[in-house]
Amino acid sequence: MAHTRYAFIKARWHADIVDRALEGFMQLIPQDRIDVFDVPGAFEMPLLARDLAASGRYGAVAAAALVVDGGIYRHDFVAQAVVDGLMRAGMDSGVPVLSISLTPHHYQETDHHRAIYAEHFVLKGREAAEAALTIARTRADVSKAA
C-alpha cells in the first residue's frame, strides 16, 4: 500500500472552496502520491473519474465539487447525475471512486458561507482520504484471506 497512488479531481466552480478538500486529503496521504486533475465543473467529473479508475494506476479516485442552488433547481439534477456517475465509475472499474461533492440548500456568496464551506471541505477531504486508506486495507485483507 505504501506505493499506492491516488487521483484527485477538482471542479473549478467555486475553486477557492473546492481546493480546500485537497488540503484535507493531503493531511493523510502525501502530496507525492496524489495526481491532481482539474475539470470545469462537477458534471465533468464522472467521465474523468471513470478513465482514471480504469487506467489501473490508482488505488482510489476522489472527486470534489460544490454544486450550489442557483434558484432554478438545476443543481438537483447535476448533483444526482454526478453522484450516480461517480458510483458507476467505481463499480464498473472496481476502483473506489469517492465523492466529496456537496450540494448545500442555503449557500450564499458571503464571506461567512465561504468560510463555513471551505472548512467543511477540508474535513470532507480528510474523510475521503481515510475512506481510501481504509478501503485499500480492507481489500488487501480480503485478498489475503481468499
Image (tube, rainbow, N blue to C red):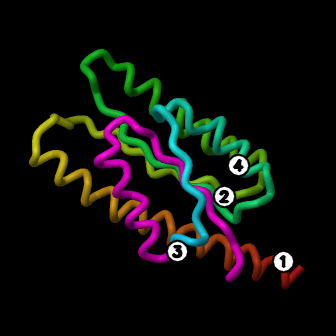
Residue that carries the numbered disc 4 in the rendered image: 52
Instruction: Note whether 97 is above or below 76 in the view shown.
Output: below
Badge 1 crowding class, 10 Å Cα cut-off, few under 14, some 14 to 19, many 20 or more, is few
Q: Relative to 55, is 36 on the left or the right?
A: left
Residue that carries the numbered disc 3 in the rendered image: 29
First along the sequence among labels 3 and 2: 3
Residue that carries the numbered disc 2 in the rendered image: 96
First along the sequence among labels 1 and 2: 2
The amino acid on which the numbered mark 3 sits, given as a three-letter code, is: Ile
Instruction: Note whether 140 is above or below 7 in the view shown.
Output: below
The amino acid on which the numbered mark 1 sits, given as a three-letter code, is: Ser
Q: Quadrant of residue 95?
A: bottom right
In the rendering, which numbered label is found on residue 106? Answer: none
Q: Quadrant of residue 109?
A: top left
Image point (45%, 40%), residue name: 11
Image point (49%, 63%), residue name: 128
The one of 8 and 126 positioned closer to us in this rendering: 8
Q: CA distance from mark 1 to mark 2?
A: 16 Å
Q: Are marks 2 and 4 in contact (CB under 8 Å)?
A: no
Badge 3 crowding class, 10 Å Cα cut-off, few under 14, some 14 to 19, many 20 or more, is many
Badge 2 crowding class, 10 Å Cα cut-off, few under 14, some 14 to 19, many 20 or more, is many
* Membership of 83 in magenta stretch: no
Badge 4 crowding class, 10 Å Cα cut-off, few under 14, some 14 to 19, many 20 or more, is many
User: Which range is magenta?
Assistant: 1-30
Image point (26%, 54%), residue name: 118
| Viewer-side label of 1, 2 | 2
Location of residue 75 in the rendering, given as x and y in whole percent from the top left corner:
38, 26
